[in-house]
Amino acid sequence: DTEVTQTPKHLVMGMTNKKSLKCEQHMGHRAMYWYKQKAKKPPELMFVYSYEKLSINESVPSRFSPECPNSSLLNLHLHALQPEDSALYLCASSLSGPHYMGYEQYFGPGTRLTVT
Amino acid sequence: DAKTTQPNSMESNEEEPVHLPCNHSTISGTDYIHWYRQLPSQGPEYVIHGLTSNVNNRMASLAIAEDRKSSTLILHRATLRDAAVYYCILTYNNAGNMLTFGGGTRLMVKP
C-alpha cells in the first residue's frame, strides 16, 4: 500500500468555523508533511513532523494548528481562517525524517479548501 | 540556497521522447536532484532523483551533467498521461527531504 489518503476532498468553511483536515498513511513512514498550494502556483511547505514530533514550522500563522496523534495520522486544525487561505492542502509522507537525504515523498490528492 | 531554473512550458508529440532541462548552477556537492510531477487535480508524484550518476527507473531517466550544474529528465516515450507540471528540486545541504518547489515546466503532449 503506497497510498496517502486525505479527507475531506473538499471543504467550505466560514471565517468563524473550526474544522480539521485529516491525512493517513500505512507505509510505516516516520515523516509527514503539510503543504499549501494556491491556484497555478507550486506547493509551499507548511509543517514537518518527524517521529510524531513537530520538526519544522515554516512561519505558518497560528490559525493553522497541526497535530500528529500517531505515526500514521496527521491532522491540520483550522480556526478563524481568512478567504486568502483558500487553497489545496496537500499531505505527504516519507520513510525517514526531513534531515535524511534522498528519500522520496508520497503525496495525497489534497483537500480543496474554500473559506467564505 | 541553490535554485533551479526550468522553462515555463514545453510541448511534445505523443510517443516521442521528451527532454526536460533544469539548470542549477549554484548546486553544492551534497545536494540531491529530485524530479516530481503533478498531474491535473492530483498531488505531486515522485519521478526520480540522483546525486552524481545518471539514473534510470521505470518512469524516466535522469541525466546529470558532469559538473552537476544542469540535469535533464528524459521521458522515453511520451503519452497523453504524461501531461503534467514537472518540478526539478534540489534538496539543500543537510536539508534532506525538504522540498522547495519552484515554478516547474508545464509539459503538453499532443496526440
Image (cartoon, coloured by chain):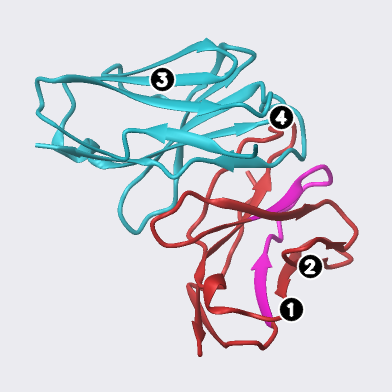
Chain colours: A cyan, B red
Q: Nearer the viewer, residue A15 or B39?
A: B39
Residue highlighted by disc 2: B61
Q: Nearer the viewer, residue B64 or B86?
A: B86
User: How many marks overall?
Assistant: 4
Residue highlighted by disc 3: A75
Looking at the rendered structure, the kind of residue marked 3 is: Asn
Is A66 located above or below residue A13 in the figure?
Answer: above
Give the residue drawn at x 30%, y 54%. A39
Residue highlighted by disc 1: B76
Percent x, y for residue B90?
67, 49
Mark whose residue sits in front, 2 or 3 = 3
Percent x, y for residue B27?
74, 52
Mark 4, other Cα within 10 Å: few <14 / some 14–19 / many ≥20:
some
Percent x, y for residue A7?
36, 32
Structural distance between the alpha carbons of marks 4 and 2:
23 Å
Structural distance between the alpha carbons of marks 2 and 1:
8 Å
* Label 4 element class: loop
Asked which quadrant contains residue A55, the reply is top right
Mark 1, other Cα within 10 Å: few <14 / some 14–19 / many ≥20:
some
Label 1: chain letter: B
Give the residue drawn at x 73%, y 56%. B48
Q: In the picture provided, is B32 more to the left or to the right than A55?
A: right
Residue highlighted by disc 4: A95
Q: Which mark is residue A39?
A: none
* Label 1 element class: loop
